[in-house]
Image (tube, rainbow, N blue to C red):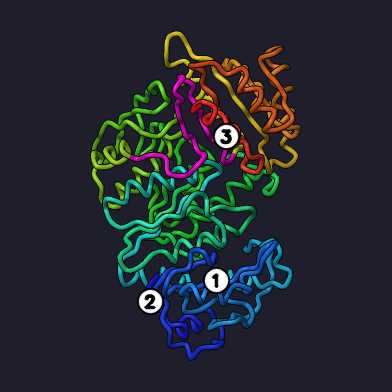
Amino acid sequence: MIPLSLAEIAEVVGGRLHGTDGSPVVTGSVEFDTREVTGGGLFVALPGERVDGHDFAAQAVAAGAVGVLAAREVDGPAVVVPPVERRGGNAYVLSGDTEGHGAAVLAALAKLARHVTDRLAAEHGLVVVGVTGSSGKTSTKDLIAQVLSPMGPTVAPPGSFNNELGHPWTALRADADTRYLVLELSARGPGHIAHLCQVAPPSIGAVLNVGSAHLGEFGSRQGIAQAKGELVEALPESGVAVLNADDPLVAGMAPRTRAKVVLVGEHPRADVRAEDVVLDEQARAGFRLVTPKGEAQVRLGVHGPHQVGNALTAAAIALELGATPQEVADRLGQAQRVSAHRMAVTERADGVTVINDAYNANPESVRAALKSLAAMSRATTPARRSWAVLGAMAELGGDSVRAHDEIGRLAVRLDINKLVVVGPDARAMHQGAHLEGSWGEESVLVPDVAAAIELLRAEVRPGDVVLVKASNSYGLWRVAEALLEAGSK
């Protein structure tokens, strides 16, 4: 963050000083975890289900924080912010926030982030890049950050820290040296993305796809498209909107923005497109990158055919910021998976390949993962035996049974050898597989993670390829880790 005194912060967020004359200057990072506080930092006091950050203010100050951003008076120097109306539209409600303290602190944090990013953009040329979509946001954010880093210091959030806390927290990691701030924008309802765009206004925005994630909250894919398009609506006339030409709902967002539109994809009308796509034995894509600035051959280091679209988005952004096609191709080839439990491909000593993609799941991402599994298993002669260990996809609302049924049927059509369905919430996958292919032992329904681990340890053979995927709340990453642990013994 840029250096600011507590008095300046109080003025920005509309708070009052407590236990200080306001002269101490924040020169360190902004943190909501006392374990991360360093000298010169600002501690953000947030309530949680079990503990309240306000109760740890003295501990944060002892660790080096010069002040606390709080909603009530605390034991230490603080900027105390006023209450705000609790909203369901543009604000996420924190668990345990019975008195509205969390909403007040988050609102203040957003104001502080906006002040800092506005100053950095005006005084130091900071470029804010926003990415949204139903799936692939985190992987694409990681690719963009890696492609832009050689062009200047780049800040991006860890993992999927993309909500009303993660967004301003990440923006406040930027300082006078930061050239690019790459942010991931999520939404659980209309207005969420528009609000995040107010926190750190992007000049470049990318929409990856419109799928079925959070269908329960939005009601339809058209409702999801309306929400995702809030990103391109927020862009300035001087900005750039990067849209997926292969997704009609995304390409249809072009009239909603004042910014320059760049289409990406494999569609012939895409401005930045991939041609002659091929996959290697680990489902890593190679393709010819075709752009208005020239062409280059790309060979990705990340796994899965779905990464082609993600890479094209990163390429288009870097090209707009001055990179050449060959520079983009070289950087994409060097880029690696950064965030955990996302298409993490590991081969055991006995040749078993484990694909840990268990961070999250929706119909589109599961289809992509199954296609990657099929491609990897068939890349050798003879083909390797394939296992799909799948748990439930959350937040699909009334569409849940149909969506799970379709995934089970797809596993049959892709000729996946073994389907292990984990937990009763995913039962429709098992049923769909049987109805599609009259499967017998090829599909197994197990009650929980422990049962899945027991089955796989007993039946996986050297050379098999095992995909593990589900929504994060089901904890299927433990299956992948157990398989890798077993292979190390």
Compared to residue 127, the image places residue 150 above or below, namely above
Gap between marks 1 and 3 measured at Cα: 36 Å
Magenta region: which residues?
335-360
Any magenta on residue 338?
yes
Gap between marks 1 and 2 measured at Cα: 16 Å
To which quarter of the image does residue 301 belong? Answer: top left
Q: Nearer the viewer, residue 75 or 300?
A: 75
To which quarter of the image does residue 86 belong? Answer: bottom right
- Percent across and percent down for residue 130 are 45, 54
Considering the numbered disc 3 on the image, is that residue within a helix, a strand or a loop? helix
Q: Residue at x 69, y 62 (%)?
A: 50
Q: Residue at x 60, y 38 (%)?
A: 361
Q: Nearer the viewer, residue 152 or 41?
A: 41
Residue at the disc numbered 3: 364
Q: Could you tell me the amino acid type at mark 3? A: Glu
- Percent across and percent down for residue 116 are 42, 71
- Assess disc 3: are there few (<14), some (14-19) or many (≥20) residues with their C-alpha within 10 Å of its C-alpha: some
- Assess disc 2: are there few (<14), some (14-19) or many (≥20) residues with their C-alpha within 10 Å of its C-alpha: some
Task: Specify which label sits upstream in the sequence, 3 or 2.
Answer: 2
Any magenta on residue 141?
no
Q: Is residue 210 left or right of residue 337?
A: right
Q: Nearer the viewer, residue 272 or 388?
A: 388
Compared to residue 70, the image places residue 141 above or below, namely above
Q: Could you tell me the amino acid type at mark 2? A: Pro
Task: Specify which label sits upstream in the sequence, 1 or 3.
Answer: 1
Residue at the disc numbered 1: 44
Considering the numbered disc 2 on the image, is that residue within a helix, a strand or a loop? loop
Task: Look at the magenta stretch and give its main secondary structure.
Answer: loop
Q: Could you tell me the amino acid type at mark 1? A: Val
Considering the numbered disc 1 on the image, is that residue within a helix, a strand or a loop? strand
Residue at the disc numbered 2: 3
To which quarter of the image does residue 480 belong? Answer: top right
